[in-house]
C-alpha cells in the first residue's frame, strides 16, 4: 500500500497548508485573528458533500447515489431503494449480497450456499452493468468486471443505496444501476460490540468492534470472521475482514477522513472444483472544506490492491493468478445557490493495472480513465428539475458522453411523481479487448438509453406504495465469435476468435411495491417485478434473464422485547433449458431476536435464524444449487 502512505502524507501537507492559509486570510485590518469562522454545512451521518439542508417531512431520507452528494430523496428523479442499518439488523444475512436478496427488482445468482460469490442484476441487467461502490470506491475487478459482494460483511455498513437504471452521468460506467455501500461513522460516545453465531455445517460468524470520539478525533474499528464447511462438496469458505475509519475535525471549515478495508478469503468452488485465495484491500483519504454554509469543496483519493489465485484441487496446480492495482481520486465542488437548488461539478481520474498469469500466458494490461461532470438540482416550489452530464475518457475503450434529465413533482404532501431519462454505458472487462485468436482492438463499451416513470405515495392511511415503469435500449452488446474456421491452425474450433459488438437488446418492465405502516407491532411488505428482455433483431425473449421476481415480508414487534421477521422471494429465472433451473417457487427465511436485558451501559441480544424454511429448490443452474433448510443462532453484546 505504498501509494496509500504517499496519499496520507500528501493529505497531511495539504491540511497543514490549508490551516496556515485560513489563519492568514482570517486576519482583520488590524492584523488580529477573527474568532468567528463561517458556519459549516452540517453532515451528521456521512462524510460526503452535503449541500442541501432541506428535508421533506414525508420523505426525509438523504441519498448520495443520484448526485454524488447528499440530496433529499424527495428531490431526485432516480428510482432508489435504501436498506438502512436498522433493516440490516433484522435480516438473516451475513454479507451485502445476502441483504440484497430482499430488494424488489434485484436478483443475485450465487455459486451455492453462504460464503459463495453472488452475481448481482438490477432489472435484468448484466452484472457488468452494475457499479458497486464502497464510499465511492469501485470494487469490481478489471479481469471480469465481477463485484464479489460476499467479501463485504454487514458489521461496518451504515446503509446500502440501490439506484435502478443508468447513473453514468454521475458515476461513469453504470448502465444498469448502482449499489452504493456507505460505511458507518464514528458515534459521539464510545461504543463496543461483540457477537458470535453458530449454524449447521460448522457455519460460524464472529464479530467485534469499537468506535467513538476523543475531542475532535473520531474512530471506528470493526473485525469479523465468517467460516463454513459448506452445504455441498467443495464449498468450504473462510472470510476474514477488518475495517477502520478515523475522522478529524481540523477546524470548523476543514474535516478529514482516512479509512482502510482488508478482506482475505479462502474458499472452494464447486463449479470449477478449485480453491480460491483472495486478498482485497483499499485505503482512502478524504478532505472536505466548507468556507461558507452554502459552498463545499471535497477531494478524495484511494488505492486498492487485489491478489486472487485459483488452484485446481485435483492436480494442486494454479489455474490462474489475478493481481490488480487501482488508484484514483475525485475533486468535487457543491454550491447550494438557493434553499432547494444545488449545483455540483468536478473531475475524476484513475489508473488500473492487471497482471494475469496462467500456465500458458503471462499478460499485463493497463488502463487510464478520466472524467469531468456536472449536475444541477433545481427546486421550483413543488417541482424539482434534475439535469446532469459527464464526459468519460477510457484509454482502452474510448470516450463517452452521458447526459441525464429528470423531473420530480410533488402532487400532494404524501405523493411524488418521478420521470427520468439518461444515457448510460458500461465497458466490457479489460482483457476482452486483447484476448482471442484475433483480438478486436476496436471493441466498444455497451451503451443504452434508459427511461423511468413512477409514482410513490403514502396518502392512503396506513399504506405506502410505489409503481415504476422502466425501459433500457442497449446497443453494442458484447458477444464473442468462435474460431470455427480454425484460424489458429491448431484444430480447436471451440476457441474464442474475438469479442465483438453485435447485439441490440431491450429491457423493459414494471415494479410494484407496497408496505403497511406498523399497527400493533405488525408490518407487511410486498414487491413485484416483471422484466421483458428481448433481442431486437429477432424479437425473441432472451433466455437466462429473470422474468418475474416477487418479494414478501412480515415484521412483528412482539412482547418481552422480541422481534420476528419473515422474508420470502419468488423468482422465475427463464433459464436456458440445459441449465436445468429450479424456479417459480418461494423461498422463506426468518429471524427471531430478543433483547436479553437493557443495562445502564450495555444491551444484550440473542437470535435464531431459519433459512429456507420450507426446504425449497430455487436456482438458475443445477451445478450451483441452493442449500436446503438450515438453522443458526447467535448472541451479541453492545456497550455504550
Image: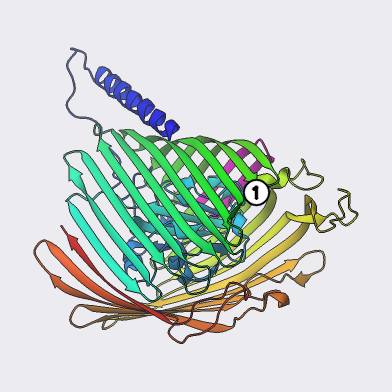
Q: How many labels does the image show?
A: 1
Q: Which residue lies furthest to the right in this view?
A: 485
How crowded pointer 1 is (Cα within 10 Å; few <14, some 14-19, many 20+) is rated as some
Horizontal and vertical percent position of residue 122:
56, 63
Q: Is most of the magenta stretch helix, strand or loop?
A: strand
Q: Quadrant of the N terminus?
A: top left
121 and 414: which is toward the camera: 121
Q: Where is residue 342 in the image (x, y as percent from the top left)?
A: 43, 43
Which colour style is shown?
A: rainbow
In depth, the one of 199 and 109 nearer the eye is 199
First to last magenta residue range:
385-406
Q: In which quarter of the image is residue 8?
A: top left
Q: Name the residue under label 1.
A: 429
Residue at the image point whose x is 22% and y is 30% from the top? 37
Point out the residue furthest to the top here. Answer: 30
Q: Quadrant of the C terminus?
A: bottom left
Q: In this view, does 136 lie to the left or right of 423?
A: left
- Residue furthest left in the image: 600
Instruction: For residue 388, say whether it is visible.
Output: no
Which one is nearer the viewer's eye here, 290 or 236? 236
Q: Where is residue 114 shown, x and y percent of the image? A: 45, 69
The residue located at (61%, 50%) in the rendering is: 320
Q: Residue at x 40, y 78 (%)?
A: 460
Look at the picture and state if 27 lies above or below 144: above
Q: Is residue 388 magenta?
A: yes
User: x, y percentage for residue 601?
Assistant: 11, 61
Amino acid at each position: 500500500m505504498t501509494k496509500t502512505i504517499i496519499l496520507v502524507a500528501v493529505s497531511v501537507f495539504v491540511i497543514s497548508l490549508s490551516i496556515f492559509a485560513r489563519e492568514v486570510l482570517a486576519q482583520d485590518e488590524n492584523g488580529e485573528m477573527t474568532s468567528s469562522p463561517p458556519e459549516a454545512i452540517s453532515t451528521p451521518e456521512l462524510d460526503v458533500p452535503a449541500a442541501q439542508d432541506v428535508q421533506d417531512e414525508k420523505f426525509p431520507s438523504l441519498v448520495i447515489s443520484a448526485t454524488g452528494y447528499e440530496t433529499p430523496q424527495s428531490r431526485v428523479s432516480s428510482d432508489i431503494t435504501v436498506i438502512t442499518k436498522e433493516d440490516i439488523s433484522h435480516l438473516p444475512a451475513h454479507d451485502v449480497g445476502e441483504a440484497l436478496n430482499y430488494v424488489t427488482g434485484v436478483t443475485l445468482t450465487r455459486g451455492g450456499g453462504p460464503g459463495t460469490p453472488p452475481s448481482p442484476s438490477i432489472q435484468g441487467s448484466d452484472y457488468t452493468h452494475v457499479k458497486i461502490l464502497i464510499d465511492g470506491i469501485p470494487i469490481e475487478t478489471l479481469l471480469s468486471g465481477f463485484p464479489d459482494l460476499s467479501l463485504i460483511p454487514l458489521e461496518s455498513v451504515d446503509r446500502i443505496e440501490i439506484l435502478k437504471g443508468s447513473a453514468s452521468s454521475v458515476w461513469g460506467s453504470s448502465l444498469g444501476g448502482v449499489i452504493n455501500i456507505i460505511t458507518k461513522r464514528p458515534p459521539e460516545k464510545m461504543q463496543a460490540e461483540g457477537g458470535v453465531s453458530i449454524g449447521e455445517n460448522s457455519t460460524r460468524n464472529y464479530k467485534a468492534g469499537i468506535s467513538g470520539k476523543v475531542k475532535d478525533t473520531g474512530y471506528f474499528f470493526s473485525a469479523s470472521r465468517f467460516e463454513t464447511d459448506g452445504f455441498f462438496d467443495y464449498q468450504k469458505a473462510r472470510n476474514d475482514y477488518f475495517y477502520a475509519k478515523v475522522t478529524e475535525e481540523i477546524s470548523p471549515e476543514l474535516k478529514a477522513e482516512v479509512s482502510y478495508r482488508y478482506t482475505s478469503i479462502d474458499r472452494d468452488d464447486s463449479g470449477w472444483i478449485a480453491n480460491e485465495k483472495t486478498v482485497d484491500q483499499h485505503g482512502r483519504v478524504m478532505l472536505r472544506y466548507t468556507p461558507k454554509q452554502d459552498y463545499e469543496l471535497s477531494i478524495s483519493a484511494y488505492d486498492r490492491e487485489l491478489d486472487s489465485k485459483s488452484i485446481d484441487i485435483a492436480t494442486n496446480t494454479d489455474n490462474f493468478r489475478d493481481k490488480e492495482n487501482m488508484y484514483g481520486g475525485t475533486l468535487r465542488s457543491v454550491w447550494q445557490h438557493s434553499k432547494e437548488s444545488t449545483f455540483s461539478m468536478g473531475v475524476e481520474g484513475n489508473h488500473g493495472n492487471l497482471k494475469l498469469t496462467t500456465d500458458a500466458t503471462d499478460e499485463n494490461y493497463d488502463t487510464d480513465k478520466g472524467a469531468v461532470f456536472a449536475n444541477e438540482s433545481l427546486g421550483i416550489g413543488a417541482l424539482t428539475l434534475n439535469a446532469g452530464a459527464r464526459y468519460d475518457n477510457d484509454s482502452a475503450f474510448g470516450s463517452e458522453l452521458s447526459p441525464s434529465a429528470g423531473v420530480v413533482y410533488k402532487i400532494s404532501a404524501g405523493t411524488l411523481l418521478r420521470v427520468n431519462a439518461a444515457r448510460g454505458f458500461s465497458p466490457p472487462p479489460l482483457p476482452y479487448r486483447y484476448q482471442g485468436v484475433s483480438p478486436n482492438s476496436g471493441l466498444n463499451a455497451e451503451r443504452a438509453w434508459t427511461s423511468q416513470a413512477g409514482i410513490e405515495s403514502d396518502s392512503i392511511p396506513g399504506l405506502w406504495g410505489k409503481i415504476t415503469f422502466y425501459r433500457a435500449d442497449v446497443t453494442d452488446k458484447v458477444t464473442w465469435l468462435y474460431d470455427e474456421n480454425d484460424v489458429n491452425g491448431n484444430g480447436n474450433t471451440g476457441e474464442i476468435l474475438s469479442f465483438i459488438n453485435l447485439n441490440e437488446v431491450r429491457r423493459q418492465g414494471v415494479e410494484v411495491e407496497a408496505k403497511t405502516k406498523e399497527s400493533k407491532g405488525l408490518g407487511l411488505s410486498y414487491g413485484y417485478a416483471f422484466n421483458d428482455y428481448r433481442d431486437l433483431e429477432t424479437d425473441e425473449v432472451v433466455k437466462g434473464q429473470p422474468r418475474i421476481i416477487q418479494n414478501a415480508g412480515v415484521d412483528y414487534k412482539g412482547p418481552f422485547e422480541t422481534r420476528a421477521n419473515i422474508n420470502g422471494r419468488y423468482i422465475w429465472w427463464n433459464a436456458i433449458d440445459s441449465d436445468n433451473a429450479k424456479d417459480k417457487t418461494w423461498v422463506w427465511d426468518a429471524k427471531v431476536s430478543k433483547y436479553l436485558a437493557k443495562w445502564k451501559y450495555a444491551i444484550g441480544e440473542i437470535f435464531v435464524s431459519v433459512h429456507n424454511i420450507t426446504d425449497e429448490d430455487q436456482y438458475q443452474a443445477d451445478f450451483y444449487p441452493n442449500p436446503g433448510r438450515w438453522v443458526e443462532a447467535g448472541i451479541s453484546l453492545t456497550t455504550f
